Amino acid sequence: MSRNRWDGDWPPRSKPLRPADGIRAQSKRGAFASGPWAKRWIAALESFQLGARITRGRAYARSGQVTQIALELGGVRAQVQGSRPKPYDVTIRVRELGAKEWHAIGAAIGNDLRLSAALLAGDMPEDIETAFAAAGASLFPASIDEMKTACSCPDWSNPCKHIAAVFYLIGEEFDRDPFLLFVVRGLARENVRDLFGPAPDPVASAQQRAIKAPRAARLLPDAFWGDNITEPDSLRTRVVAIAPDEPAELKRAGKFPFWRGDIALRDALVPIYDDAATHALDWLADRADTSPK
């Protein structure tokens, strides 16, 4: 039987098993990407003319066939459930930019006060690619040659639908946290600030802080309080209350990666934070009642 009877797929199509805990795409129908970073990522991939498997990968991403995803420096590792009991292992490697390229990108960003200020504030400007272009580099893969993909499935096409499904899901993650684009290009998020100049010397910084610190702040407790180390009553009297707003930790954390619960993670965690705060408040009140007056 000729291969074209299978519409370009070999081995022939089979119905995939449905995992109970698969990662479902946020997009349910129509155009897959809604945010700017996912749109650019998917547009870059589709420009490589990878064939119909990209479309089938989108269906896999929406039906929850991807069971695990881990983004790391220079790429992604994932598992995708196919028609066999054991999920397929998927690896996507993106060419990491070299030290000279990152140095040129950092210089271009440093020359643009608006870009550097936004990055230092923890925001990714949508026109950050101008700095990459000025450095002769690209934030997104410029060609399929910049990517190496592999899947343990028997399909000889590369990328297969399993790889394509992972492509789409990590696009959604770039919308959640655009700094992950730096990560897959080989730059850890904590090193982004180093792009704008040499990292500070930790020893020198500590010495400068010690010089600028008030003298009293460097005294030992017994020297500060004198012979009586007991805290003054004004410091022992405290008013403790539960903050009315959402916990700051949840605001700083943003959207949790690959959260696919029935409700938003923040809505699931806020009651837990409230219960913990109430318990802590009761504990402090009990200590206040039993402490010596």
Image: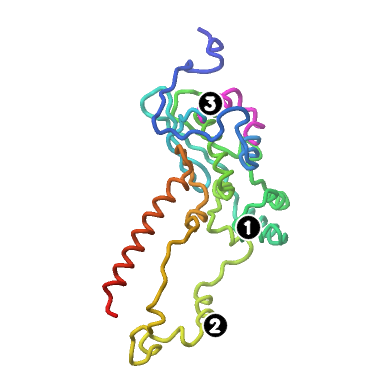
Which residue does the numbered mark 3 point to in the structure image? 59
- Residue 119, given in percent of the width and then of the height, sits at 63, 57
Kind of residue indicated by mark 1? Leu
Which residue does the numbered mark 1 point to in the structure image? 119
Q: Is residue 158 visible?
A: no
Q: Along the line of sight, which residue is nearer the eye, 195 or 236?
A: 236
Kind of residue indicated by mark 2? Lys
Disc 1 crowd, CA 10 A, few/some/many (<14, 14-19, 20+): some
Q: Secondary structure at mark 3?
A: helix
Where are the magenta residues, as a range?
44-61
* Sequence-first disc among 3 and 2: 3
Q: In the picture, residue 268 is in which quadrant?
A: top left
Q: Is residue 31 left or right of residue 266?
A: right
Q: Say which residue appears at 43% left-offset and 25% top-offset.
A: 82
Q: Along the line of sight, which residue is nearer the eye, 12 or 208?
A: 208
Q: Along the line of sight, which residue is nearer the eye, 98 or 114?
A: 114
> How far separated are the C-alphas under marks 1 and 3?
35 Å
The disc at residue 212 is 2
- Residue 273, given in percent of the width and then of the height, sits at 41, 54
Q: Is residue 219 visible?
A: yes
Q: Is residue 291 left or right of residue 114?
A: left
Q: Is residue 266 magenta?
A: no
Q: In the picture, residue 109 is in which quadrant?
A: bottom right
Q: How is the image coloured?
A: rainbow
Kind of residue indicated by mark 3? Ala
> How far separated are the C-alphas under marks 3 and 2?
60 Å
* Sequence-first disc among 1 and 3: 3
